[in-house]
Each structure stands twice: as C-alpha cells, then as structure tokens.
C-alpha cells in the first residue's frame, strides 16, 4: 500500500466516515500524528504558486519535498525562503517531468502560466499525484475538457482548481443569504473588474534571454518566439498563447460566483459580447482592454463589465458583484457583503432585512485546507475540475467571440462546438509546438 492510500485509508477506517465531515476546517492538521504526513511539490514558483505552497506548509505534517521552475533565479530564491522560514530543503528541478518521477511526492501545486496547466496536470495524475492547479484551469476549451476527463479517469486522486472564493467565508455567506431567500428571487448578477495591469506594460524591444532562464521550456507547447520582458513573468496574461487577459484572470473568479449563485452546472449556451480596445495608449498586449458580456439564463441574467488600464469602479471598488433580487440588492467583494432592501410602498416597510459583513479575508488558506482534507477523506473538493471547466468556459467563450469579431456565439456543449461560427470552432483546440503533444485520455 503506498503512502497516499495509507493516508486516506487511515482517515476513513479510524473514523468510519470521511474525516472532514467530523472535524471542522482548520483543526485536523494540528492533530495528525507525525507519521501521517503529506509531501507536496511546487511547479512554477514565482508568485501565486509560492503563496499556495506556503499555505500548505503552515499545516502540520505537510512537507515540501520538491520545487521546479524554469527560471533558476526564482527557483533558488524561493527555495532559500522555504529553508529559512520552514527549515525544509526540497529537491530542485528545472524540468517538471523529472520532478514527477520523485516517488515520495503525494501532491503537486501547479503555479505556472495557464498554457502549461493541462499538460502538467495530466502528467501529474498519470504519475499518481494529487493536483492543486491554479485558475483558470486551462487556457483553451479543449484542454479543460481533457483535464475533466483525466480527473475522472484517475478518480482516486484529488484535483482542486484554484478558485479559492469557493472555500472562503464571504462568498459562502453570500450564497447562504441568496439560498435563504434574503434578497428574494435572484434576477440579475452584475460583475465588474477594472485593473490597471490588464492594459499591459509599456512597449519595449525584444532582448536576449536572461541568464538562468530556460525560455524554450517556459514557452513549452506555445509557439516559438524571441524573448520580451513584457510577455514574461506576470505579464504573459495579456497574450493569447499563454493567458486570456483580465477577462480570464479575474473573470474566472468573479463569474464563478454568479454561476454558483444561479446553481449553473454547464457552460453558457449563448453569449452576447463586446470586446475591444478603448484605452488610448499603445501597450504591449494582445488581449482586449474593454469587454462587456451578457450571459442570459432561464430566469436571470449575468452581466460582465471589464475595463483595463484603470483601477476604480462602482461602490468604490475596482471589482465586485451586485446580486439583484426582487427584495434586495447585495454588493459583495472579497472583504465585504452589503445587503440593501427594497422598500414595499404598499406595506410601508422594507422587503428584506439590512445586512452587513465586513470581516472578509483572502481565502487561499481555506481552499488549501479543503484540498488537504479531501486528500485525507477522499471527498470531492470545493472546486473540482467540472466546476473549474464551467467557469473557464464562461471566460474562454467570450474571448473567442471577441477574437473572431462575433457579437454572439452559441455553444453546443453536448457536441463541443459552436453552432454559428467556424472561426470560433478553430479556437477551441490549441496547436501544441513539437515535441509537446496535447494529452489524450
Ligand atoms: N487564485 C488566485 O487568486 C491567483 C492569483 C494570481 C495568479 N493565479 C494563477 O497562478 C498561475 C501563475 O500566475 P503567477 O502570477 O504566479 O505567474 P508568474 O509569471 O509570476 O509565475 C509563474 C512561474 O512559473 C514558472 N514556469 C513557467 N513555465 C514553467 C514550467 N514549464 N515549469 C516550471 N515552472 C514554470 C515561471 O518561471 C514563473 O516562476 C496562473 O495560472 C494564474 O492565473 C491565481
């Protein structure tokens, strides 16, 4: 019996049922015996991946046994931080395939740019590892489909997609309020995201690849090209080969909350889309700086509004959601909920009760906790690949519409194609650069 099965079977047989249903979140990690440890590895170390690794390591019994990055400067710096702050000395790799051969790794965290998520997730599952993959779960529709299939095939492994708001108190409370009828029947979800970085960096010329960087491995399955800092660390998001711009970067988080509120379990059938460039300064970017998307549902509508190159927005917040019900309007972001009732002029009283919650915090630690608990219990995580796919398609479909200049796209989920645009169908599946191959399950 391997370690991972031991960890899970111990959790189940000693309690009779899944441990996470007995022990509240945040408790188990501090009660596990030393032998009941979890070995994790990080692939893609610079920013979010490193944050997620640290959240893992703040749980007792979780060890970092390996780290991998194609930029050795980042790898060495982050490994030194792990040594200093957690006293651990993981093995270091520049090629994730070598890391995946390391037998004592139970779970991998994937913190690379989006164009790598699918291939590394599938390879990690094939190597027997659990996977925490950052959002959006993949950069194309076809890759999302492959990942859902792979997770189903390797179903004794847990795959958590990094849509952490699903595990956080603010949005859990917001969903409770909606489901408890506190805003009346849901009519509309208005979502906005306005961020300066989405307009891209100032344009600079291409340069030689910096020392210590394996740029060909950074590009991986994406087309070969010369090096430019404005398409590299952090800023890759604004180029179609690696990301989907602000639409996918923030859209996947915020649209996921509209999807959750409406109990939506499938990609949108129809989207109405404006995508264009209204920012007047020329920047290094391919993705759009302005997008408006309408997602009609049976009895309510989701509306997305995004402006890159600025940082202010409605309700004094650069991003957020307004859930509009028959009886009240509820504004939500990661830090707060403000519910304002409508007034009933006939009954001469408010239609709902006012409500305010302002103690929200980032929910990455809770999402990691949920992942670890699910590895132990075998339960479904808060954001499994099916959920990640629905959110990802809510951002990829409008991006495809805007790229093809289609104001409306109709998606046939059963047949995995658009019914009204050949150009859009051509953007479903990425063309992998040799020797990389789109995984087949
Ligand atoms: N959940 C969240 O709130 C949240 C927030 C920020 C970023 N993210 C997601 O996290 C992921 C990473 O974003 P980021 O901001 O950390 O990007 P980043 O560019 O700062 O870091 C990516 C790292 O991956 C490395 N890398 C690239 N290809 C690699 C490969 N083949 N093998 C190993 N390492 C490789 C890069 O060298 C870099 O160190 C993205 O998918 C992003 O959408 C999620």
Image (cartoon, rainbow, N blue to C red):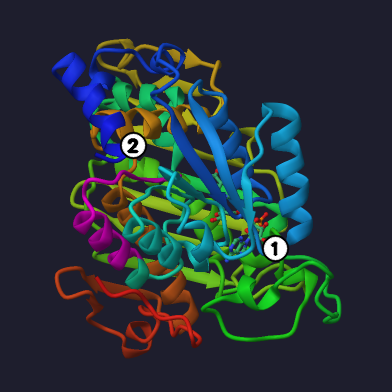
Q: Position of residue 178 (x, y in %)?
A: 29, 27
Asked if the magenta segment contains residue 157, the reply would be yes
**Residue range of the region highlighted in magenta in the rendering:** 144-162
- Disc 2 from disc 1: Cα separation: 39 Å
Q: Quadrant of the N terminus?
A: top left
- Checking the image for residue 405, the label placed there is none
Quadrant housing the C terminus: bottom left
The residue carrying mark 1 is 235
Seen in the picture, residue 195 relative to 211 is either above or below; the reply is above
Q: Which residue is mark 2?
A: 3
Q: Dot 1: few (<14), some (14–19), or many (≥20) neighbours within 10 Å? A: many
Residue 334 appears left or right of 34: right
Q: Nearer the viewer, residue 255 or 377?
A: 377
| Whole-percent x, y for residue 106 in the image | 40, 42
Q: Residues within 10 Å of mark 2 (few under 14, many from 20)?
A: some
**Occupied quadrant, residue 35:** top left
- Determine whether the beta carbon of the residue marked 1 sits less than 8 angstroms from the nearest atom of ligand 1: yes
At horizontal 42% and vertical 44% (from top left) the residue drawn is: 107
């Amino acid at each position: 019996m391997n370690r991972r099965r031991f960890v899970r079977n111990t959790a189940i047989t000693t309690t009779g049922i899944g441990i996470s249903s007995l022990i509240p979140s945040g408790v188990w990690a501090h009660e596990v015996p030393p032998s009941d440890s979890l070995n994790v590895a990080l692939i893609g170390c610079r920013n979010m991946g490193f944050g997620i690794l640290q959240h893992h390591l703040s749980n007792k019994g979780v060890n970092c046994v390996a780290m991998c990055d194609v930029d050795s400067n980042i790898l060495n710096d982050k490994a030194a931080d792990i040594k200093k702050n957690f006293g651990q000395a993981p093995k270091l790799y520049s090629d994730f395939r070598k890391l995946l051969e390391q037998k004592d790794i139970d779970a991998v965290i994937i913190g690379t740019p989006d164009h790598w998520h699918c291939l590394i997730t599938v390879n990690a599952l094939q190597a027997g590892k659990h996977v925490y993959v950052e959002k959006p779960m993949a950069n194309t529709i076809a890759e999302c489909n492959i990942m859902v299939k792979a997770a189903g095939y390797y179903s004794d492994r847990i795959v958590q997609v990094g849509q952490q708001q699903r595990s956080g108190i603010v949005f859990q409370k917001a969903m409770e309020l909606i489901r408890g009828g506190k805003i009346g029947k849901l009519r509309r979800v208005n979502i906005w995201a306005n961020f300066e970085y989405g307009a891209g960096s100032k344009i600079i010329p291409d340069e030689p690849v910096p020392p210590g960087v394996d740029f060909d491995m950074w590009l991986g399955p994406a087309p070969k090209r010369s090096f430019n800092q404005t398409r590299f660390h952090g800023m890759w998001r604004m180029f179609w080969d690696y990301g989907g711009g602000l639409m996918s970067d923030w859209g996947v988080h915020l649209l996921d909350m509209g999807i959750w509120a409406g109990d939506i379990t499938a990609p949108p059938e129809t989207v109405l889309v404006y995508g264009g460039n209204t920012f007047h300064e020329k920047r290094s970017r391919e993705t759009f700086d302005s997008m408006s998307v309408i997602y009609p549902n049976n009895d309510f509508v989701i509306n997305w509004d995004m402006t890159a190159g600025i940082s202010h927005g409605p309700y004094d917040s650069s991003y957020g959601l307004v859930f509009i019900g028959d009886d009240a309007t509820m504004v939500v972001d990661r830090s707060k909920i403000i519910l304002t009732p409508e007034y009933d002029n006939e009954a001469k009283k408010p239609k709902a009760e006012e409500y305010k919650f302002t103690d929200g915090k980032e929910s990455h630690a809770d999402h990691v906790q949920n992942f670890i608990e699910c590895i132990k219990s075998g339960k479904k995580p808060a954001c499994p690949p099916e959920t990640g796919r629905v959110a990802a398609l809510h951002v990829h479909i409008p991006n495809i519409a805007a790229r093809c200049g289609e104001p409306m796209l109709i998606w046939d989920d059963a047949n995995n194609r658009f019914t009204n645009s050949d150009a859009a169908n051509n953007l479903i599946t990425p063309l992998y650069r040799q020797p990389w191959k789109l995984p087949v399950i």
